[in-house]
Every structure is written in C-alpha cells, then in structure tokens.
C-alpha cells in the first residue's frame, strides 16, 4: 500500500496558495479503504482546505442543476423518442434511430400500446431554469479557475504525464486497480485531470451549445451555431449523446468516490476538509 | 477553518446579499423595460425571466433562419387536431368566405377582415421551419400578410404591449409582445408550399411566429386583441400555454 503524505500536495502540482492546496476530490484509483482512513485521521492537522470555497459551492450547484436537467431532459425526451440528422425530422421522416421506450404522446409510433403520462410542461420550465443555473455557475467556476490558477495548478497535467508511455502505464494501473502512487492521494492523477478537463471544457460547453442551437430565437441570432452542427435535428441528437457521456461521467465519478471512501471525498467537497466525525468510519 | 477562508466566506456572504438586493432592483427595472414575461410569478419564473430578458436584449430584431426551396419538407407532419366544431364546419361549407378575423383593444380603428380582405393586402413569403416542443420539426414555405401591416392598418396605440390571438378552438389562445408582433416574419398565414393553407396545418388562417415554438403558432385564428396588460385575460398568466403548465415565451 502506498499512501503519500496526505495533503502534502501533489508530487508536482502543489501550490503554495493557502486554500488551493491539493485538489483531492476523487482519485480514480480505488485506494484501499484503510489508506484513506489513515489519510483522513492526519488531515485534521492540516489547516488548508482541499477545495476552495468557490469550487465547493459551484460543485454542488452544478450537481443540483445537472440532476434537474437530467430528470427533465429524460422526461422531455419521452415525448418524441426518435432522433434525426440534419435540419428536420418528424414522424413522417426516417429517423436516425429510435429509443425502444414508450412515448408520452400518442402521435409517436413506438410499438407500445400505451402512452406515458405527459409531464412536459414543468419539465421544460425546470429544464431551462436549471440550464441557467448550470451555465451561470459554470461561468463563475470557469472565471475563478482561470483567474486564480485552479485549472493550471490542479487540472492541467504535467507534460511528462502526457507521454504515450506514461499514459499507457497509468491506464494499465487503473485497469489493474493498482493502489495510487505516492503523492496521488494529495492531488489529481493524470487520468482524472484529463477527464475533468474533458467534462469542463468539451462536454459541458457542447451540451450548452447544442441546447441553445434548439432555441428558435437564438438560432436566428446566431445561425452559424446550428449550421456548424449540421442542422437543428443534428443539434438535438448531439445534445442527447453528450448528455449520455455526462451521465457516464457522473456514474464513474460516484462509483470511484464510493470505492475510495465516500465520506473521505464528499466531506472535503462540502467542508473543505474532512470533519472529525469521520473517524468513526 | 483558517482565517483566510473565514474572510472569504464573509466576503461571499456580502457579495451574495448585494446580489439579492441587486436582483430585486434589476427585476424592477426589467419590468419597466418589458423584460419580464407574464408568467414570471409562477414557480419557474426566475428561469423564464432570464430567458425572456436575455432574448429581448439579444434577439429582438434577429430573423428566423430561412431555407432554400429544395429544403422544404416533402411530407410535413400537421400534428393531430381536435374536432373543430359545428361553427368551423359551417364556415368550411361556405369555402370560408364568411371567415373573419376581428382586431380590437388598443387600436385607433377596430376592424374585422375577411380572408379576401387579407388576400388583398401586401403579401410576404418565407421558407422557415416550425418546431414542436416535443422535438420534431419540418420546413415549409409560408405565405401571408405580415401582422405588422394589419396592426398599422388598424392603428395600434403606442401603449399597446401585447397582441392576443385566439383560435376558433376555444381552449387555444396565445399572446406575443410587440417585438414579435411587429417582426417582419410574423405572418397571418393564408398559404403553404404554393397552395392554400391546408386545414390540418391551420387553414384557412394561422399566425406564424417563426421565432417561437409550434404552440405559439395558433391555427384557425379568429380574433386579435391589443392590450397593455395580460392580467385581465384568462387567469392572468398571458395565454393558454402557462395555464396548461407551459412557458408563455416559447423562443426558448
């Protein structure tokens, strides 16, 4: 078992700014349980929080917004579980694919003899309200991350970690469920960094873009936003797939947190660091 | 927690309180500038207000995308239509020669137009898509009289802020603000794809608001009312959509 000095900072990304410390949110390595408890019991002596207050607040706001978007998005989807490519698509045109689920509208051919309850009204209201929360929170987080160096310090991988051999070895270690290397416990490992960067700078902007591309007023204002994607129905289809990827991220993220010790990861994301009662874990 | 975090927390609290106070002031100002939708008082009002205000600031004069003739959908989907009732059947038997659309409210010269009156006004045509809130869409060529022309003809009063429009179907009535009402692509539509507007698509008269979703594009329009406030109509939420749980503003 290799447990680095907990919270002593990453082996190469530690910063001296007090609150930034190490961004030990969720190591993708399944740290053995005893090691995380060892890390926790020592953490009380360290004054700096693992996560900056802005990171913590925006993390949970995004969590709430994402869950609302997910539930309402799934509900909106059931009113027309068919997907198309290009500008247009309706029940008289050939779909790209159809989800094998019943629909909430009786005009859609689904193969099911029943129609789901229609909940689109509040789902749409809440979807767009949650989208505002997600985008405004995302902008706050991104502004903070750039201004303050959070991205550069905690998420940007070291160039040496990005070599093919280094990445291959990291992936192999993940596949073997190998314990983290010294220092990994106090920082994000390279696969985590790449995953978070992908979510923050690719998937999240893409899901926002494809969502906006379905707004009839916005696409009039910025037509290139739609044509670049191949059309309004293409935007809807991409919106669906990016959402699936975000759900996959959420699932892996939560599984990893449970594997390495739920409270040892969720505690710091709430309080900045692990509070005392965790010793009973 | 370190002193620095505590200071930061206090600072965030102050910023938060200032934010709330600022929002309250902003809401007051936004109301004055017509940036607050009529369903803003409902549960999802904050999100709706942000959407409507942002789009009124950004897209007030934006034009809906137009397409080329070869992009017109070959087999458009009309969606299902409830039975239209005996009055519609009677008008239809008379080839809609008695169909009239009345314009009243905040206008200098209330009037009522037949379809042939509308047919004699300057026409405009556009190839735009119509998208249902369910997710499907199609593209068609729409021909009709810009609503702005009719509103100028009856002399819309400067204090008018909304146009209410009603279908022969009693449960379907909607309203739009003057930005959408006076928009050059907002059409009292009489024709589609080079022919008369078919009944399933809203014939003989449909209001096309191409910058909003399908449910704002009311079929079988029989009357228009200009008003400075939507509070005294229906449940005071602006239109039938919010009464049925849907957003009043459907530009999304």
Image (cartoon, coloured by chain):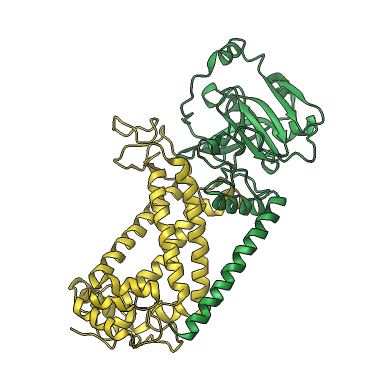
Whether residue A163 is visible to the viewer of this picture, yes or no, is yes
* Residue A21 location (% of width, % of height): 40, 84
- Image position of B104 (left or right of B239): right
Q: Which quarter of the picture shows residue B129?
A: top right
* Quadrant in which the C terminus of chain A is drawn: bottom left
Left or right, residue A220 beside residue B124:
left
Give how far across and how far down residue B211 sits, in percent. 60, 42
**Which residue is drawn at the image coordinates 27% and 83% (left, top)?**
A41
- Chain letter of the yellow region: A
Q: Nearer the viewer, residue A233 or A116?
A: A116
Height in image: A105 above or below A40?
Answer: above
* In the depicted structure, whether residue B145 falls above or below residue B246: above
Q: Is residue B182 above or below residue A235?
A: above
Q: Residue at x 48, y 85 (%)?
A: B3
B191, A107: nearer the viewer: A107
Locate residue A232 relative to residue A96 in the image: left or right: right
A153 horizontally vs B90: left or right = left
The answer to whether one can see residue B33 in this image is no
Q: Position of residue A47 (x, y in %)?
A: 39, 86
Query: How many labels were placed on the picture?
Result: 0
Residue found at x 53% / y 72%: A143
The N terminus of chain A - image quarter? bottom left
Residue A184 in which image quadrant:
bottom left
Chain B, which colour?
green
């Amino acid at each position: 078992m290799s447990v680095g000095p907990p919270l002593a900072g990453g082996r190469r990304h530690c910063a001296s700014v007090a609150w930034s410390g190490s961004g030990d949110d969720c190591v993708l390595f399944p740290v053995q349980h005893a090691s995380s408890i060892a890390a926790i019991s020592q953490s009380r002596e360290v004054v700096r929080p693992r996560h900056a207050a802005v990171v913590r607040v925006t993390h949970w706001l995004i969590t709430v917004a994402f869950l609302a978007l997910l539930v309402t998005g799934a509900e909106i989807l059931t009113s027309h579980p068919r997907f198309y490519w290009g500008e247009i698509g309706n029940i008289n045109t050939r779909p790209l694919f159809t989800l094998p689920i019943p629909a909430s509208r009786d005009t859609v051919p689904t193969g099911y003899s029943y129609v789901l309850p229609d909940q689109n009204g509040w789902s749409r209201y809440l979807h767009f309200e949650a989208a505002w929360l997600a985008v405004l929170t995302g902008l706050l987080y991104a502004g903070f991350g750039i201004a303050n160096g959070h991205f550069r310090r905690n998420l940007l991988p070291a160039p040496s970690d990005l070599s093919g051999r280094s990445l291959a070895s990291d992936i192999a270690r993940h596949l073997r469920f190998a314990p983290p290397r010294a220092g990994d416990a106090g920082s994000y490992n390279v696969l985590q960094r790449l995953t978070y960067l992908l979510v923050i700078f690719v998937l999240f902007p893409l899901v926002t873009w494809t969502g906006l591309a379905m707004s009839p007023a916005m696409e009039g204002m910025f037509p290139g936003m739609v044509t670049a994607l191949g059309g309004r129905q293409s935007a809807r289809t991409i919106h669906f797939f990016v959402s699936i990827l975000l759900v996959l991220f959420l699932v892996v993220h939560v599984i990893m947190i449970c594997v390495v010790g739920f409270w040892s990861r969720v505690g710091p994301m709430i309080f900045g660091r692990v509070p005392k009662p965790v010793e009973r874990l | 927690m370190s002193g620095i975090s505590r200071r930061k927390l206090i600072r965030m609290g102050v910023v938060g309180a200032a934010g709330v106070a600022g929002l309250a002031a902003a809401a007051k100002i936004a109301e004055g500038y017509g940036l607050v939708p009529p369903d803003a008082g409902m549960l999802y009002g904050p999100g709706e207000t942000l959407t409507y205000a942002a789009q009124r600031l950004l897209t007030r004069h934006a034009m809906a995308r137009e397409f080329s003739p070869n992009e017109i959908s070959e087999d458009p989907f009309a969606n299902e239509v409830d039975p239209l009732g005996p009055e519609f059947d009677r008008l239809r038997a008379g080839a809609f020669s008695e169909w009239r659309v009345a314009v009243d409210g905040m206008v200098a010269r209330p009037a009522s137009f037949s379809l042939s009156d509308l047919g004699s006004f300057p026409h405009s045509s556009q190839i735009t898509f119509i998208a249902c809130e369910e997710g499907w869409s199609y593209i068609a060529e729409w021909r009709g009289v810009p609503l702005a022309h009719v509103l100028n003809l009856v002399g819309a009063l400067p204090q008018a802020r909304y146009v209410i429009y009603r279908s022969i179907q009693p449960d379907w009535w909607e309203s739009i603000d003057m930005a959408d009402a006076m928009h050059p692509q907002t059409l009292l539509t009489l024709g589609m794809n080079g022919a008369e507007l078919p009944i399933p698509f809203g014939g003989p008269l449909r209001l096309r608001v191409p910058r909003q979703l399908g449910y704002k594009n009311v079929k079988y329009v029989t009357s228009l009312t200009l008003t400075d406030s939507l509070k005294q109509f229906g449940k005071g939420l602006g239109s039938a959509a919010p009464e049925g749980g849907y957003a009043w503003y459907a530009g999304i």
